[in-house]
Image (spheres, rainbow, N blue to C red):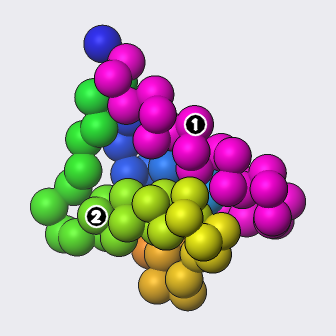
Amino acid sequence: MIALGPEDIAHGLIRYASAGGDVLREWARLILEASSIYDLDIEEDGRGEVLVDALWSLTFDGRVGEEALRAARELIAEGIE
């Protein structure tokens, strides 16, 4: 099984957020629909849950909140350090 961590979702969210609209919504839908083929490893500090909540929000209303974008940027920055 493939492991997908919060950092992976963070990178995708930032990448596809710049495309916006339908591209971002389709990416979120694909990640959620493919959850049967990967193990979602959400970290304990809560940012992973924020990102997963953002995926659900994107599929329904096409919007991503600033909290999710901030969490994504933080996770990416921590991975670079």
SS for dot 2: helix
The location of residue 72, given as percent across then percent down, is: 51, 67
As drawn, the residue found furthest toward the left would be 44
* As drawn, 4 above or below 46: above
The location of residue 18, given as percent across then percent down, is: 81, 65
> Is 55 on the left or on the right of 40, as rendered?
right
Earlier-in-chain disc, 2 versus 1: 1
As drawn, the residue found furthest toward the right would be 19
Q: In the image, what residue occupies the spot 37% across and 66% down?
A: 53
> Is 31 on the left or on the right of 2, as rendered?
right
Query: Is residue 74 something one can see in this rendering?
Result: no
> Is 27 on the left or on the right of 54, as rendered?
right
C-alpha gap between disc 2 and disc 1? 17 Å
Q: Which residues are magenta?
A: 14-37
The amino acid on which the numbered mark 2 sits, given as a three-letter code, is: Glu
Q: In the image, what residue occupies the spot 79% across and 51% down?
A: 23
Residue 34 part of the magenta segment:
yes
Q: Quadrant of the N terminus?
A: top left
SS for dot 1: helix
Q: Main secondary structure of the magenta part?
A: helix
Q: Using the rendered view, name the quadrant where residue 40 is placed.
A: top left
* As drawn, 34 above or below 58: above
- Residue indicated by mark 2: 49
> Is 37 on the left or on the right of 30, as rendered?
left
**Within-10-Å neighbours for mark 2: few <14, some 14–19, many 20+:** some
The location of residue 33, given as percent across then percent down, is: 46, 34
Dot label at residue 30: 1
Query: Is residue 49 something one can see in this rendering?
Result: yes
Q: In the image, what residue occupies the spot 72% across and 56% down?
A: 24
